[in-house]
Amino acid sequence: MTAERIVSVWESLRFPADAYGSAPGVLERIYDQAAEAPKIQSAIDWLYEHIEEFREFLSDHDYRWVFEPRAYGAGNEAYLQMRVLQQLSALYRIYKGVGMRLPPMGDVVVRGSLTSRYDMMSPRYLPRQGIHFIVVPIGFADWSQLAWWAVYCWCAGGDATDVDPWLAVTSRRHSSGVPAPEAEPSPALLELIARHFADPAKDLEVDRTDAAAVIAAKLPSFRRAAGLRPPEELTAFDEDIGYVLFDWSLSHELGHRLAGHAEHAQPGDPGYLDAEQEADRLGFDLFRASWGWRSSLLERAPIDEAGRIFFGSLVFFHTARLQSILKAAVESKLGSEVPGACDARDGEQEQRARRWLETAVAWIQSLEGTSAAMSTETRGRIEAFAGNLTGFGEHVVAVVQKIPDDEIARISSIVGGLTK
Ligand SMILES: [Zn+2]
């Protein structure tokens, strides 16, 4: 494998604009190459600094190209590539140590991608021509940051920033439970909803008008979101959530590589649930094996280590769930859903969620009696967190439903006007 081959295969791929991802090559035109070069170099420098920890894995797999700046289009790709290497080499060492048969771990390449659609926005495994791409939509980080900020505001009971976010999301705010679904929406949630309504007009490839901002300026229900930008400085909460979210999604997608899947199945495809569960199971192994690389992560969260490890996948699970709740709420409000299609998709997602929880519970049980067992306090916080997130989902649906019909009727003309 060479940097040239990676670039040429990636350039040869063309995704339909309305499906997952977008035209590769466009990112390279957007990124300021002069600004990206030092970021790429610093990721490579980091690898040299920690080379001892990777030596065995790298001597057994052809990853020479990871040291070549030409292999990357942007700093973030190089940075995420190093995190992929952390996971693979950590699991490799454990498997090798106990003499386990090694699964395929070679030729995994991280690539950033644009996407103009807010569903299926998390990283995705995409094997093509012998290269095992993990495609990362660049909007994922931004979307997640907004979503978790909205969760925090809701759990804290307003836009207040004086409440510790971790305490807010992991404890019940009232003894009677979470706030009512009708609670006043935060600017962050309104911005997220506006983005989902504006979705068809979003074209990050060129500097078009920000359709969500236009909706916020023109429709009274969204006014509080007007001019909203995510907090400029990342807080410890954003940083931890963002890190753990990316790492777990990389773990799951790498799970598909380890399992030898020929393609990432879609809901409705035969074997979809089995394939997803297999990737989740291997993902747990990768995430756990590489925990040492991020052991300082979530230190500010009031939970023990077993809880922190479990939290990674839990945060991802709830982020994905929020995406589908928002999408379904917006589609039903616009009357654009295909009859029946949503039920089938939801049914399968629900089933997947249940099986995912079974995998997670089995993992927690495997820790019983060891020093890594989860404490009662941590369990209580995780349960409060799950309860808060369920309540937040209901809040999202209630807020979308409350938007007046005359505003909804104007959205398509606003968005349609911008796409022309
Ligand atoms: Zn998957």
Image (spheres, rainbow, N blue to C red):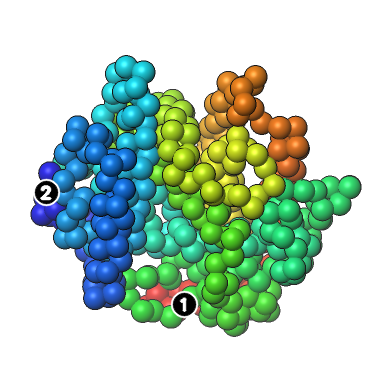
Check residue 2 in the rendering and tell me which mark sits there, or answer none: 2
Q: Position of residue 418 (x, y in %)?
A: 43, 78
Q: Quadrant of the N terminus?
A: top left
Quick check: 379 left or right of 347? right
Residue at left offset 45%, top offset 74%: 416
Instruction: Name the amino acid, label 2.
Output: Thr
Front-lying residue, 258 or 62? 62
Does residue 354 appear anywhere in the picture? no
Ligand 1 lies under 8 Å from the Cβ of mark 2: no
Residue under pointer 1: 210
The quadrant where residue 72 appears: bottom left
Check residue 105 in the rendering and tell me which mark sits there, or answer none: none
Label 1 crowd bin: few (<14), some (14–19), many (20+), radius 10 Å: some
Give the Cα distance between marks 1 and 2: 38 Å
Q: Position of residue 344 (x, y in %)?
A: 53, 36
Q: Position of residue 24 (x, y in %)?
A: 24, 60
Residue at left offset 27%, top offset 46%: 51
Q: Quadrant of the C terminus?
A: bottom left
Residue at left offset 36%, top offset 43%: 86
Residue at left offset 49%, top offset 64%: 142
Does residue 176 appear anywhere in the picture? yes
Q: Earlier in the sequence, mark 1 or mark 2?
A: 2
The secondary element bearing badge 2 is classed as loop
Front-lying residue, 257 or 164? 164
